[in-house]
């Protein structure tokens, strides 16, 4: 399978099954577009009015060599690999601890309902968190590196328990030959010097929630009394980012129907000195006024192009920054299983509520049909786990002919469920935007190689 496109002056050809990327001239680009459906003689006749015959024949030879080298027009060797997925043993490697089902903000797009997740406000006790970490250790097999994200609501509303659980996790590492990688997601309201010192010592990554421009952020992320939170949190976030030497963190925002010009929000964060930025599309029921619409998609795609070009300009000027959705590894990247099955929700990754219930991920919390078990009894709904084992790019009709399938790994199961009531379907707007992000990301790699003289 081949995907061809032009972006920012580059002719890009992606060989989907091998992952090979080729930046080519106009002649080779045109030949590749005709190659599978026409003979060399037919291609030569079709292009003779546009190019010299000798050039066409030489380029045809180059394309044939690329095919023989298995970096162009390669076969899909992964289809049969997926059959064994249900048989593979389940090893849990990550937990999302809902340390606080409560929040001090009232974000308009919050899928957690101001932290309540369709239920009651609650803070996780140390006892429940300890049992969750014990479950992770016991069900992680021989895996050494384990991940735990402190999530909410707002996890700093339960900071004492966060500190206790980190200490407990550290106390278990040597005895069980494990290494915990703790992360934290915060809205910044309760950030202070004590918290920052602890986070910098213990957290491998920290996510700082901010939506970009002040007017955008304050509209979507107000306090419960309606006042904005931007002026309070931004100095703290700037201090946090600098204290981590501009690495191992993200300022993470959400854009909505109200700010489809979100590139300006990304750049506003870059202008404040942040180097690790993620501004992502909202996922919301279509009846919500802030939800993205199909009509928004072309506008958003233009914004991705605009952002990518500006990132190239800033990189040349020595003012570059990372944008999460444009970060792509063309040389190594995830293993085959990860490329096919995605985030591992419901199998390798679980969410834990304050009272110890297990769900496939944080976006399923509160949907009782996805309640998998609890910290006392373990996973009791193995049928849910087995269903998620089979959630992969070959189980989804919309993925099979999509060039981006090995980069998005089938997309978000929760989004598929919420929009189509099936975890093996796909959220169409999300797919459109993912394809555009992959195109921009590959173009940025081509531009970076050009900047570096490769």
Image (cartoon, rainbow, N blue to C red):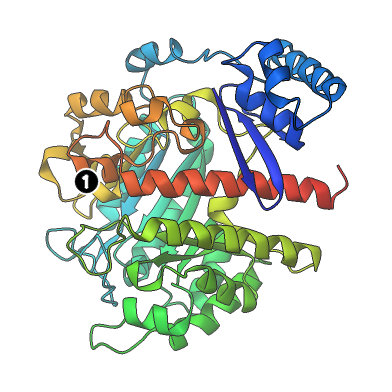
Residue 246 at x, y = what percent? 66, 66
- Taking the spot 65% from the left edge, 75% from the top edge, the residue there is 273
Asked if one can make out residue 356 in the rendered structure from this viewpoint, the answer is yes
Task: Give 37 or 431, whichever is nearer the viewer.
Answer: 37
Quarter of the rendering containing residue 87: top left
Asked if one can make out residue 221 in the rendered structure from this viewpoint, the answer is no
Which residue is labeled 1 in the image?
Answer: 419
Number of dots carrying numbers? 1
Residue 173 position (above or below residue 35):
below
Quarter of the rendering containing residue 21: top right
Residue 400 position (above or below residue 176):
above
- Taking the spot 60% from the left edge, 71% from the top edge, the residue there is 241
Task: Give 49 or 99, whichever is nearer the viewer.
Answer: 49
Quadrant containing the C terminus in the rendered view = top right
Residue 429 at x, y = what percent? 34, 49
Residue 396 at x, y = what percent? 32, 27
| Category of crowding for the residue at label 1, using alpha-carbon neighbours closer than 10 angstroms: few (below 14), some (14–19), many (at least 20) | some
Quarter of the rendering containing residue 211: bottom left
Quadrant containing the N terminus in the rendered view = top right
Task: Give 361 or 279, whichever is nearer the viewer.
Answer: 279
User: In the image, is 141 to the left or to the right of 70?
Assistant: left
- Taking the spot 35% from the left edge, 73% from the top edge, the residue there is 258
- Taking the spot 69% from the left edge, 32% from the top edge, the residue there is 29
Secondary structure of the residue carrying numbered label 1: helix
Task: Give 228 or 56, whichever is nearer the viewer.
Answer: 56
Q: Which residue sits furthest front?
A: 49
User: In the image, is 378 to the left or to the right of 138?
Assistant: left
Residue 91 at x, y = what percent? 39, 27
């Amino acid at each position: 399978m081949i995907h061809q496109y032009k972006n920012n002056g580059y002719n890009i050809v992606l060989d989907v099954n091998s992952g090979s990327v080729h930046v080519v001239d106009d002649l080779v680009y045109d030949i590749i577009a005709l190659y599978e459906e026409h003979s060399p003689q037919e291609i030569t006749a079709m292009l003779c009015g546009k190019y010299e015959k000798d050039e066409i024949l030489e380029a045809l030879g180059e394309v044939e060599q690329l095919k023989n080298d298995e970096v162009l027009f390669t076969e899909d060797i992964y289809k049969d690999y997926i059959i064994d997925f249900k048989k593979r043993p389940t090893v849990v490697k990550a937990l999302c601890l809902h340390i606080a089902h409560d929040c001090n903000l009232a974000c308009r797009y919050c899928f957690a309902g101001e932290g309540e997740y369709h239920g009651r406000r609650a803070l996780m006790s140390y006892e429940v968190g300890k049992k969750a970490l014990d479950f992770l250790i016991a069900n992680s097999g021989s895996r050494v590196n384990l991940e735990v994200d402190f999530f909410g609501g707002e996890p700093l509303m339960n900071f004492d328990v966060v500190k206790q659980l980190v200490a407990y996790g550290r106390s278990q590492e040597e005895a069980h030959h494990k290494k915990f990688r703790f992360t934290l997601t915060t809205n910044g309201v309760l950030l202070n010097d004590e918290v920052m010192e602890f986070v910098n010592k213990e957290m491998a990554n920290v996510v700082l929630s901010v939506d970009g421009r002040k007017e955008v952020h304050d509209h979507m992320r107000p306090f419960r009394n309606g006042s904005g939170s931007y002026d309070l949190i931004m100095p703290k976030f700037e201090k946090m980012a600098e204290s981590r030497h501009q690495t191992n963190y993200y300022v993470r925002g959400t854009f909505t129907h109200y700010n489809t010009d979100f590139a300006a929000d990304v750049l506003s964060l870059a202008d404040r000195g942040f180097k690790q930025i993620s501004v992502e599309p909202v996922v919301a029921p279509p009846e919500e006024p802030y939800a993205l619409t199909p009509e928004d998609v072309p506008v958003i795609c233009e914004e991705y192009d605009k952002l990518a070009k500006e990132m190239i300009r800033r990189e040349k000027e020595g003012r570059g920054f990372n944008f999460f959705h444009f970060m792509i590894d063309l040389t190594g990247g995830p293993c085959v299983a990860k490329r096919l099955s995605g985030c591992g929700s419901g199998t390798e990754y679980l969410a834990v509520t304050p009272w110890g219930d297990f769900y496939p991920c944080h976006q399923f919390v509160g949907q009782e049909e996805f309640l998998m078990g609890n910290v006392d009894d373990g996973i009791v709904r193995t049928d849910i786990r087995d269903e998620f084992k089979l959630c992969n790019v070959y189980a989804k009709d919309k993925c099979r002919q999509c060039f981006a399938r090995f980069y998005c790994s089938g997309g978000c199961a929760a989004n598929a469920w919420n929009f189509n009531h099936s975890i093996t379907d796909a959220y169409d707007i999300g797919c459109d935007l993912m394809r555009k992000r992959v195109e921009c990301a590959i173009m940025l790699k081509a531009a970076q190689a050009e900047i570096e003289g490769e």
